[in-house]
Image: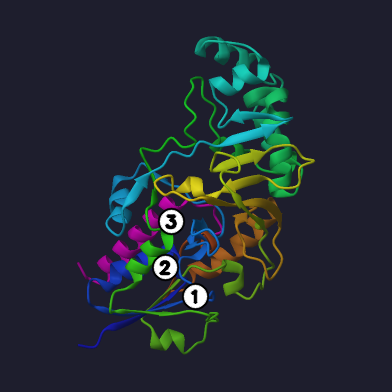
Amino acid sequence: MNKTKILIVGAGFSGAVVAEQLAKTNQFEIHVFDERNHIAGNCYTERDKETNIMVHKYGPHIFHTSNREVWEYVNSFIKFQPFVNRVKAVYRGEVYSLPINLHTINQFFRKSMSPNEARAFIESQGEKSIGEPQNFEEQALKFVGKNLYKAFFYGYTKKQWGTEPKNLPASILKRLPIRFNYDDNYYNDLYQGIPEEGYTEIIRKMLEHPNISVILNSKFTLNPKDLDTYSHIFYTGPIDEFFNYKYGRLSYRTVYFKRYVSDGDFQGNAVINYTEENIPFTRIHEHKHFTPWETHNKTVYFEEYSKETEPNDIPYYPKRLETDLQILEKYQKEVNSLQKITFLGRLATYRYLDMHHVIEEALNIAKKFLEKSNIS
């Protein structure tokens, strides 16, 4: 039986999920292209050759979701070990707990307040003159007041985004919780963990179906012949690149790392943020702490630096400034006119998406595509 040919651009979670869902129907021949020399995109993990520690090559990835379907889906490929992300922050030589919680508040203000007392105290710290916050800085000042904002948000945010926080949308801060108990779990989600054998192994298992062919080191450029060869194309690369930047480049921040190896344990925690502006890196992640079920005599850790994305850099965080959204609207009109191409994932939709959001979106898109194709 001749199978319907499908082209998927990108071997990260978006592309791999769609490929796996379509492949198992046995109705499609699927070609997955990726310009890198490996699968798994920015979730790529590998064993460090010097220490044998599982390293998240493009920065820490902790899987968290409250979507049971997504959680069961990823666990069907590999075993997830429980992992709670307990981030710390260094400010003026002291180590604090993040997200801001009752311990952070009491430590910072040298008090021993109860939850109700702390809630009232933080409300008294907020800037009363701010009505509806118009930017990140106003949101923070209204939310936690000047002292906590300067300590934990101002310097870190300026380093992370490369601009004054008042130039950023208020929506960025709305994702960050503040707690009036001693809960230091960075996430609120019901399910949290890290794959025992790393994220690359999940993607490998998704793509190992005989109906899937993976072509690495292959940069995709749309050829009119592709629309004749393939019944449908799923594209997960940068939306502006797809259209050859005809309306301009969308802006991203990217990150780079400085690697260090030492004996023993460097910082005693997976992630520690450095919130002061005069410290050039944003955080240090020590990867042996992402796999506490393993034992290693040495340790490998990375200083993480943020900078503006240049043409040859890997884009990480969409800035989504007003000028970006104006450009995006033009590209989106082009996307809406395409009949045989689906754009999905963080880069193709120019949104910040966590892994579980990416997987949920890809599962839904695959389901709708199969329904439209009358395949159950």
| Residue 342 x/y as whole percent | 43, 69
Instruction: Quickly name the residue at label 3.
Output: 358
Separation of marks 1 and 3 at Cα, in angstroms: 17 Å
- Spatial CA span between label 3 and label 2: 10 Å
Q: How many marks?
A: 3
Task: State the residue position of label 1.
Answer: 34
Say which mark, if any, is on residue 111: none
In the rendering, which numbered label is found on residue 15? 2
Residue at image coords 42%, 59%: 199
Q: Position of residue 127 (x, y in %)?
A: 70, 21
In the rendered structure, which disc, 2 or 1, sits on the residue that comes first in sequence?
Answer: 2
Look at the image and give the residue range highlighted in magenta: 350-376
Element under disc 2: helix
- Identify the colour scheme used: rainbow
Visible residue check, residue 49: yes
How many other residues sit within 10 Å of disc 2, few (<14), some (14-19) or many (≥20)? many
Near mark 1 (Cα within 10 A), the count class, few <14, some 14-19 or many ≥20, is many
